[in-house]
Image (tube, rainbow, N blue to C red):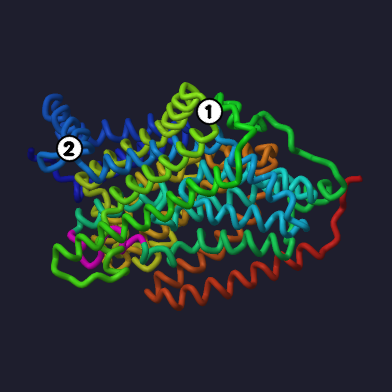
Amino acid sequence: MNLTDFSSSALSLLPPLLALGLAIATRRVLLSLGMGIVLGTVLLNDASLIPASQYLLDVITGLFIADGGLNSWNLSILAFLILLGMITALLSLSGGTRAFANWAQSRIKSKRGATLLAAFLGVFIFVDDYFNSLAVGAVSRPVTDRFHVSRAKLAYILDSTAAPMCVITPASSWGAYIITVIGSILVAHGVTDYSALGAFVTMIPMNFYAIFALLLVFAVVWFQLDIGPMRQFEYQAQKGSRLGDESEHCADICDDLGIEESVNGTVADLVAPIVMLVFATVGAMLFTGGQALAADHHAFSILGAFENTDVGMSLLWGGLAGLLVALTMTIKQRIAVPDIAKTLWVGAKSMFGAILILLFAWSIGHIIGDLQTGQYLSSLVQGNLSPQLLPVVLFLLAAVMAFATGTSWGTFGIMLPIAGDLAAATDIALMLPMLSAVLAGAVFGDHCSPISDTTILSSTGARCGHIDHVATQLPYAIGGAVVSTFGFLVLGFTASLLWSLAATTLAFIMLCAGLLWLKKRPSKRKA
């Protein structure tokens, strides 16, 4: 099929601009991505109905069938998301989250310990941001309440550990999605220096916002860096008031899903499935990577195995192992089979929205590649904007889009292919820094957005007023973004990860010192 060449035409900007504009105006990501897909299809085929229909059918079919067989990569990722939803629902049914909360409440002895528990759990439970926010919130809330930690601070801890951990962890729903998008970008531009997983791992230390958002959480918890609205909420909580804890989003998510938690749950019911999920996934990664090394007659090594692993299949096997353990935990309690079956369906259904976004994102990424939008943008940048500024520009642009749309995944789907095309056409050495800037900016914008699903679920998990959570988290998110902006500037101009990390570390120390100074300033408090 002969497609129209748009590499030197401003028309190549229309589909992504339409998707961006509609997403900002309507806040409906699927509609926006869908309209961008349709417009791109029409442009590529000169508005001819039959060729456009055939092209779109080929794009959609390619998501499931490739090279005459099943697209095992895409299908394994979709299956993993469904398995993850089922595991999450079963952990609620088994009463594991409730049991762990009761266990922790009898062992934590201080306010700092209560908040550290929430922070460490947020880091440990990294398989999915939804699961992180809801499970960690359910486990931590009774403990933090006991030591008079405000629900606003708990919501901040949930939100600022969920997405940052998921975006830098390969064995997560976010990591799986990002790796698939990166893989298609590398193939499209003939990059063979590293695999999709290798590129993802290399990008982890470049994701400045995720790293310093996580570090800031622990600094805030350890030094009690309460500033702005957070200071008022912590003061009221210390007095015994639950200021701002009631809102329309405070209903327990398990009640909303119709899952009745077992009263016979144990700590093992929560821990065992998560541990199995993590270890089985890592084990499968080493196994599939080892098989690939053996096929190429290379000696086994851990790094080599991770470089050559089949991430999608590994996540699938890890998800199946985790689900098997979660099912075992519910069956041993003699929970009725119809209740288990209903819970499995509810869990699978909860992931359908994420799966749709993923399918639409894969499709528009393919179309943007065919439109060669990045090549046209690069022609505008050359001579007008230094390529060294592109990482920080993409960071800010991704932040604006994620803030307006309330979704990181939608931002990834639109911005990552553009960043890849732009890097390939200007300076291929900046490919990974530019992709990292998109990831970092999307998480920052998502953190600040009141319509973000992760933000809403964090306030739900903490049972905190939603707008109160947005207002209290914003100063910390902006602080992390300032550090990240500085880091991407240094990375762009020096191309040195070591220098950029040194610069961002210094900026982070200055940020914490500033927050400590603000904390010590006297403030007016309501009686």
Residue at horizontal 50%, vertical 48%?
Answer: 272
- Specify the quadrant of the image occupied by residue 247: top right
Which SS class for mark 1?
A: loop
Magenta region: which residues?
Answer: 190-200
Q: Position of residue 187 (x, y in %)?
A: 20, 55
**Front: mark 2 or 1:** 1
Whole-number angstrom distance, CA of label 2 to CA of label 1: 39 Å
Q: Is residue 387 above or below residue 316?
A: below
User: Looking at the image, do the residues carrying marks 2 and 1 touch, with CB atoms under 8 Å apart?
Assistant: no
Residue at horizontal 76%, vertical 50%?
Answer: 149
- Whether residue 226 is visible, yes or no, is yes
- Residue where numbered disc 1 is placed: 335
Name the residue type under label 2.
Answer: Ile
Which numbered dot is residue 65? Answer: 2
- Specify the quadrant of the image occupied by residue 515: bottom right
Residue at horizontal 23%, vertical 38%?
Answer: 63
